[in-house]
Amino acid sequence: MCKQPKHEQTKTDWLDSLRHEARMLVHELDATPAVRRLFEGRIRQDDYVHYLVQSYQYVRWSTQFFTESGERMHREGRNPALAELLFQKAWEEQGHEQWLLKDLEALGWTQERVERAPIRPAVRAYVEWNRFTTQAGVPAAFLGTAYVLEYLSVKRAPGSVERLIAESGIPHIHKAVLFLKGHGAADGDHVADLESALRAVTSPEEQAALLHSARTTRILFPRFFREP
């Protein structure tokens, strides 16, 4: 019986690898004390503010990266279905940075103060990596980033909202969970729709780029949080 060469992947194989990156991100965050306190609703206010500020600094670019990636795919005559998917994701992400600013406003932070706050190196690396893939790499790659982050939202955001409100003791916390609540509610459908669309990706170059971006995000994301 002829065996498939090791360097070749079936459609199922590469999607399994993508799911593995998403599952590993959740596992690694669960094992990171600073993140686990967020998931369990035990996070201190200053650490929660830090998380929201760092989230703003990467979420603010999402719509632009999706749009620019879709435009490049159109210009270069690449997969038109993926280009349309990127435009759809750009529409879905519109205004999410405003959720974060409203959350931070409820905790006493103005937008000007948010903009002046230091940005963690991992957040800078995330933004510049995705800027590179958007502008000069394989433009479909940002979908790998989106997949693992939306998977994370589905698995952890809803429970985190409930526990923060019940357990954290942070003043006005019920007004400061728009970002988590919004992602937890929407991303379940988004993950299923995204996975369905990605089954049509047959280009080894695009598959590899998606996986590489997913893995890069999985490595960087735990370092968005302030260490104890």
Image: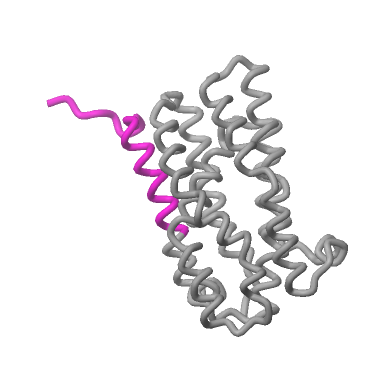
> Could you tell me which quadrant the N terminus lies in?
top left
Query: Where is 41 relative to 212, above or below?
Result: below
Nearer-the-camera pick, 134 or 179: 179
Q: Position of residue 17 (x, y in %)?
A: 38, 44
- Span colored in magenta: 1-25
Instruction: Report if residue 33 is visible in the image.
Output: no
Instruction: Report if residue 173 is visible in the image.
Output: yes
Q: Residue at x 50, y 75 (%)?
A: 163
Q: Residue at x 73, y 62 (%)?
A: 102
> Could you tell me which quadrant the C terminus lies in?
bottom right
Q: Position of residue 182 (x, y in %)?
A: 57, 55
Magenta span dominant secondary structure? helix
Nearer-the-camera pick, 46 or 19: 46
Can residue 24 be found in the magenta stretch?
A: yes
Side (left or right) of 218 relative to 174? left
- Rendering quarter of residue 62: top right
Q: Position of residue 57 (x, y in %)?
A: 73, 56
- Rendering quarter of residue 115: bottom right
Q: Residue at x 42, y 57 (%)?
A: 24
Nearer-the-camera pick, 196 or 54: 196
Can residue 69 be found in the magenta stretch?
A: no
